Image (spheres, grey):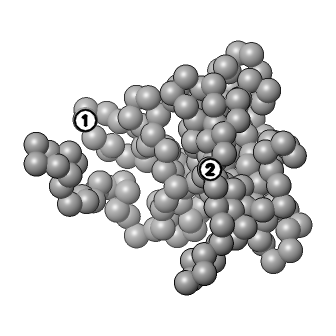
Amino acid sequence: MRTSEGWSLPQELGPPFSSSGQYGGFSVAADNSIYFWGRKGGLDGRGGFWVAPFVDNTWPRAIKIPVEKGNLNPCHPGIAPDESFLVFYSIKPGAQGGTETDLYLTLRLPDGTWTKPRDMGPRINTGYFDWGARISPDKKYMFFTRSTGWNLGPVCDTGDIYWVELKDYLPEAYR
């Protein structure tokens, strides 16, 4: 929290984020709702995406988002500010040793359901780790990280931040 003296020490958000499961990769929508992923053993014993709507200056509960996973292992959602679409990464099906990750896009339909996730294609996804998507406030750009691996030892793998215009990846109604 920012105070008149600077930043305070980190504070736990509390429920529903402090449950016994493993959570992470959060993204905040324009209305302060928080989108995040949870591993198995989390809020409902299953992994997947969740949203904690911001109500009365707090996040009283988390709601499971019914995104079809198929053979994907979705992680770290990046939500559009208006919550109309979500970009996430998954280990690419068939990647050797579960190393390569790709970015996937799912659209929220007018009835509240989500489309089947689709790979964002070769202009974004590479033979490296493509992850950590975040959407600009005007929904024109996506920022993401590309790295050569997850090695966090003394010799770290390389990682860079990239950006792309989203107009080529979104239907007109979602721009």
Residue 88 lies, with reference to residue 159, above or below; the image says above
Q: Which residue is more in the foreground, 60 or 26?
A: 26
Tag 2: Cα neighbours inside 10 Å, few (<14), some, or many (≥20)? few
Q: Residue at x 89, y 67 (%)?
A: 94
**Residue 116: percent from left, percent from top:** 78, 40
Element type at mark 2:
strand
Q: Write down the quadrant of residue 58 in the picture.
A: top left
Q: For the residue marked with disc 2, what is the amino acid?
A: Ile
Asked which secondary structure carries label 1, the reply is loop
The answer, for residue 22, to whether it is visible in the render is yes
Q: Earlier in the sequence, mark 1 or mark 2?
A: 1
Q: Quadrant of residue 95?
A: bottom right
- Which residue is disc 1 drawn over? 57
Residue sitting at 63 percent across and 25 percent down?
A: 140
Tell me, yes or no, if residue 68 can be seen here.
Answer: no
Tag of residue 161: 2
Residue farthest to the left, as pictured: 4
Quote the CA–CA distance across marks 1 and 2. Answer: 32 Å
Indicate the position of residue 2 as horizontal and vertical percent values.
Answer: 20, 45
Q: Is residue 45 left or right of residue 126?
A: left
For the residue marked with disc 1, what is the amino acid? Asn
**Where 11 falls versus 108 (above or below)?**
below
Residue 76, horizontal then vertical, whole percent: 58, 54
Specify few, some or many for label 1: CA neighbours under 10 Å numbering under 14, 14-19, or 20 or more: few
Near-viewer residue (92 or 63): 92
Q: Position of residue 29 (x, y in %)?
A: 47, 34
Which residue is depicted at the point 10% across and 48% down? 5
Quarter where residue 8 is shown: bottom left
In the visual, does 140 lie left or right of 14? Answer: right
